[in-house]
Amino acid sequence: MSAALGILGGTFDPPHNGHVAAATAAWKQLGLDQVLIIPAGQAPLRSAVPLAPAADRIAMAKLAFADCPWAVVDDRETLREGVSWSIDTVRELANEHPAAWRVWILGADQLARLDRWKEVEEICRLVDFAVLARDGISTVPPASLAKHIKLTILTAPPVLVSSTALRSAIKRGDSSRNGLPSGVSRHIDERSLYQA
Protein backbone atom coordinates (compact mmCIF):
# COMPACT_ATOMS: atom_id res chain seq x y z
CA MET A 1 0.00 0.00 0.00
CA SER A 2 1.33 3.40 -0.93
CA ALA A 3 1.77 5.93 1.83
CA ALA A 4 1.54 8.77 -0.69
CA LEU A 5 -0.58 8.11 -3.75
CA GLY A 6 -0.93 10.39 -6.77
CA ILE A 7 -3.89 10.16 -9.14
CA LEU A 8 -3.75 11.47 -12.70
CA GLY A 9 -6.96 11.10 -14.66
CA GLY A 10 -7.81 12.10 -18.21
CA THR A 11 -8.89 10.73 -21.55
CA PHE A 12 -5.25 10.20 -22.67
CA ASP A 13 -6.42 10.39 -26.27
CA PRO A 14 -3.45 10.16 -26.88
CA PRO A 15 -1.20 10.42 -23.81
CA HIS A 16 1.67 12.88 -24.40
CA ASN A 17 4.76 14.36 -22.81
CA GLY A 18 2.67 16.92 -20.93
CA HIS A 19 0.93 14.11 -19.04
CA VAL A 20 4.29 12.55 -18.19
CA ALA A 21 5.67 15.93 -17.08
CA ALA A 22 2.70 16.56 -14.76
CA ALA A 23 2.96 13.12 -13.14
CA THR A 24 6.73 13.43 -12.80
CA ALA A 25 6.49 16.89 -11.21
CA ALA A 26 3.99 15.61 -8.65
CA TRP A 27 6.02 12.48 -7.92
CA LYS A 28 9.21 14.45 -7.35
CA GLN A 29 7.87 17.55 -5.62
CA LEU A 30 5.40 15.78 -3.33
CA GLY A 31 7.50 12.69 -2.62
CA LEU A 32 4.80 10.34 -3.88
CA ASP A 33 5.37 6.59 -3.67
CA GLN A 34 3.14 5.84 -6.64
CA VAL A 35 1.10 7.67 -9.26
CA LEU A 36 -1.98 5.98 -10.71
CA ILE A 37 -2.63 6.88 -14.35
CA ILE A 38 -6.39 6.47 -14.84
CA PRO A 39 -7.76 6.81 -18.39
CA ALA A 40 -11.43 7.79 -18.38
CA GLY A 41 -14.18 5.81 -20.03
CA GLN A 42 -16.63 8.60 -20.93
CA ALA A 43 -15.57 11.83 -19.24
CA PRO A 44 -18.56 13.84 -17.97
CA LEU A 45 -17.26 17.26 -19.03
CA ARG A 46 -16.45 16.21 -22.60
CA SER A 47 -19.22 16.12 -25.17
CA ALA A 48 -17.35 13.78 -27.51
CA VAL A 49 -16.43 10.20 -26.79
CA PRO A 50 -12.70 9.39 -26.96
CA LEU A 51 -11.55 8.75 -30.52
CA ALA A 52 -9.28 5.82 -29.67
CA PRO A 53 -10.80 2.70 -28.09
CA ALA A 54 -10.20 2.22 -24.37
CA ALA A 55 -7.84 -0.71 -24.96
CA ASP A 56 -5.62 1.48 -27.15
CA ARG A 57 -5.64 4.36 -24.67
CA ILE A 58 -4.64 1.95 -21.88
CA ALA A 59 -1.86 0.50 -24.06
CA MET A 60 -0.62 3.98 -25.02
CA ALA A 61 -0.63 5.11 -21.39
CA LYS A 62 1.53 2.12 -20.47
CA LEU A 63 3.93 3.01 -23.29
CA ALA A 64 4.01 6.70 -22.31
CA PHE A 65 4.95 5.85 -18.71
CA ALA A 66 7.18 2.85 -19.50
CA ASP A 67 10.25 4.62 -18.08
CA CYS A 68 8.47 5.64 -14.85
CA PRO A 69 8.53 2.66 -12.45
CA TRP A 70 6.50 4.64 -9.91
CA ALA A 71 3.58 5.05 -12.37
CA VAL A 72 0.86 2.40 -12.64
CA VAL A 73 -1.83 2.47 -15.33
CA ASP A 74 -5.22 1.70 -13.78
CA ASP A 75 -8.08 0.71 -16.11
CA ARG A 76 -10.98 0.88 -13.63
CA GLU A 77 -12.80 3.78 -15.31
CA THR A 78 -12.68 2.22 -18.78
CA LEU A 79 -14.37 -0.89 -17.37
CA ARG A 80 -17.37 1.04 -16.01
CA GLU A 81 -20.60 1.43 -17.90
CA GLY A 82 -21.61 4.99 -18.75
CA VAL A 83 -19.98 8.19 -17.54
CA SER A 84 -16.74 8.00 -15.55
CA TRP A 85 -17.44 10.05 -12.43
CA SER A 86 -14.33 11.07 -10.47
CA ILE A 87 -16.25 10.75 -7.19
CA ASP A 88 -16.69 7.01 -7.80
CA THR A 89 -12.96 6.58 -8.41
CA VAL A 90 -12.05 8.67 -5.37
CA ARG A 91 -14.35 6.66 -3.10
CA GLU A 92 -12.89 3.38 -4.40
CA LEU A 93 -9.33 4.60 -3.82
CA ALA A 94 -10.18 5.88 -0.34
CA ASN A 95 -11.50 2.39 0.51
CA GLU A 96 -8.49 0.66 -1.06
CA HIS A 97 -5.90 3.01 0.46
CA PRO A 98 -7.52 4.36 3.65
CA ALA A 99 -4.26 5.39 5.33
CA ALA A 100 -2.60 6.88 2.24
CA TRP A 101 -2.18 10.56 1.46
CA ARG A 102 -4.18 10.76 -1.78
CA VAL A 103 -3.41 13.59 -4.21
CA TRP A 104 -5.33 14.27 -7.43
CA ILE A 105 -3.03 15.84 -10.04
CA LEU A 106 -4.56 18.22 -12.56
CA GLY A 107 -3.75 21.06 -14.92
CA ALA A 108 -4.65 24.67 -14.23
CA ASP A 109 -7.30 24.53 -16.96
CA GLN A 110 -9.06 21.71 -15.10
CA LEU A 111 -8.78 23.52 -11.77
CA ALA A 112 -10.78 26.44 -13.18
CA ARG A 113 -13.79 24.17 -13.70
CA LEU A 114 -13.38 21.92 -10.70
CA ASP A 115 -16.59 23.34 -9.25
CA ARG A 116 -18.46 21.55 -12.08
CA TRP A 117 -17.33 18.10 -10.88
CA LYS A 118 -20.02 15.88 -9.38
CA GLU A 119 -19.98 15.91 -5.54
CA VAL A 120 -16.80 17.96 -5.58
CA GLU A 121 -16.95 18.87 -1.89
CA GLU A 122 -16.87 15.16 -1.06
CA ILE A 123 -13.94 14.72 -3.46
CA CYS A 124 -12.12 17.55 -1.64
CA ARG A 125 -12.66 15.70 1.63
CA LEU A 126 -11.15 12.47 0.29
CA VAL A 127 -8.19 13.82 -1.72
CA ASP A 128 -5.86 16.80 -1.80
CA PHE A 129 -5.11 18.43 -5.13
CA ALA A 130 -1.89 19.32 -6.91
CA VAL A 131 -2.09 21.67 -9.88
CA LEU A 132 0.56 22.14 -12.53
CA ALA A 133 1.15 25.87 -13.07
CA ARG A 134 1.01 27.02 -16.70
CA ASP A 135 1.77 30.47 -18.05
CA GLY A 136 -1.25 32.71 -18.12
CA ILE A 137 -3.65 30.29 -16.39
CA SER A 138 -4.74 31.01 -12.83
CA THR A 139 -3.97 28.47 -10.11
CA VAL A 140 -6.62 29.94 -7.83
CA PRO A 141 -9.47 27.46 -7.27
CA PRO A 142 -13.09 28.46 -7.90
CA ALA A 143 -14.31 30.66 -5.05
CA SER A 144 -17.00 28.17 -4.04
CA LEU A 145 -14.29 25.59 -3.24
CA ALA A 146 -11.79 27.86 -1.47
CA LYS A 147 -12.68 26.64 2.03
CA HIS A 148 -12.85 22.97 1.01
CA ILE A 149 -9.80 22.37 -1.16
CA LYS A 150 -6.26 21.55 -0.07
CA LEU A 151 -4.06 22.60 -2.99
CA THR A 152 -0.35 22.42 -3.81
CA ILE A 153 1.08 24.28 -6.80
CA LEU A 154 3.57 22.24 -8.85
CA THR A 155 6.26 23.69 -11.07
CA ALA A 156 7.70 22.06 -14.16
CA PRO A 157 9.23 23.23 -17.44
CA PRO A 158 6.40 24.08 -19.83
CA VAL A 159 5.39 21.36 -22.27
CA LEU A 160 3.34 23.06 -24.96
CA VAL A 161 1.39 20.13 -26.31
CA SER A 162 -2.22 19.01 -26.35
CA SER A 163 -3.98 15.82 -27.36
CA THR A 164 -6.28 17.82 -29.64
CA ALA A 165 -3.37 19.37 -31.56
CA LEU A 166 -1.60 16.01 -31.81
CA ARG A 167 -4.71 14.31 -33.22
CA SER A 168 -5.05 17.08 -35.82
CA ALA A 169 -1.39 16.75 -36.82
CA ILE A 170 -1.71 12.98 -37.21
CA LYS A 171 -4.89 13.34 -39.26
CA ARG A 172 -3.10 15.83 -41.57
CA GLY A 173 -0.27 13.35 -41.99
CA ASP A 174 2.36 15.57 -40.35
CA SER A 175 5.57 13.65 -39.83
CA SER A 176 6.46 15.72 -36.77
CA ARG A 177 5.11 14.18 -33.61
CA ASN A 178 6.72 16.57 -31.13
CA GLY A 179 5.22 15.92 -27.73
CA LEU A 180 4.46 12.23 -28.26
CA PRO A 181 6.52 9.57 -26.49
CA SER A 182 8.10 7.37 -29.17
CA GLY A 183 6.29 4.22 -28.06
CA VAL A 184 2.95 6.02 -28.27
CA SER A 185 3.77 7.29 -31.76
CA ARG A 186 4.61 3.75 -32.92
CA HIS A 187 1.37 2.38 -31.43
CA ILE A 188 -0.65 5.05 -33.24
CA ASP A 189 0.97 4.10 -36.55
CA GLU A 190 0.60 0.36 -36.00
CA ARG A 191 -3.08 0.74 -35.15
CA SER A 192 -3.78 3.56 -37.67
CA LEU A 193 -5.32 5.70 -34.93
CA TYR A 194 -6.57 9.28 -35.49
CA GLN A 195 -5.98 9.06 -39.23
CA ALA A 196 -9.58 9.02 -40.43
Image (cartoon, helix red, strand yellow):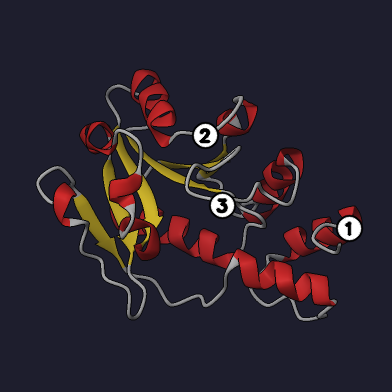
Specify whether residue 25 is in view.
yes
What residue is shown with label 2?
Answer: 84
Foreground residue among 194 and 12 = 194
User: Where 148 falls versus 156 (above or below)?
Assistant: above
Q: Earlier in the sequence, mark 3 or mark 1?
A: 3
Q: Which mark is residue 39?
A: none
Q: Residue at x 67, y 46 (%)?
A: 62
Amino acid at pointer 2:
Ser
What amino acid type should be assigned to the residue bearing mark 1?
Answer: Ser
Mark 3 = which residue?
A: 68
> Mark 1, residues whose alpha carbon is within 10 Å: few (<14), some, or many (≥20)?
few
Name the spot of residue 150 as percent of width and height, x first: 18, 47
Q: Which residue is mark 1?
A: 192
Pointer 3 or 2: first along the chain: 3
Q: Position of residue 130 (x, y in %)?
A: 30, 54
Helix, strand or loop under label 3: loop
Which of the image's four quarters has the C terminus? bottom right
Q: Which of 127 and 162 lies nearest the eye of the viewer? A: 162
- Which image quadrant for residue 97? top left
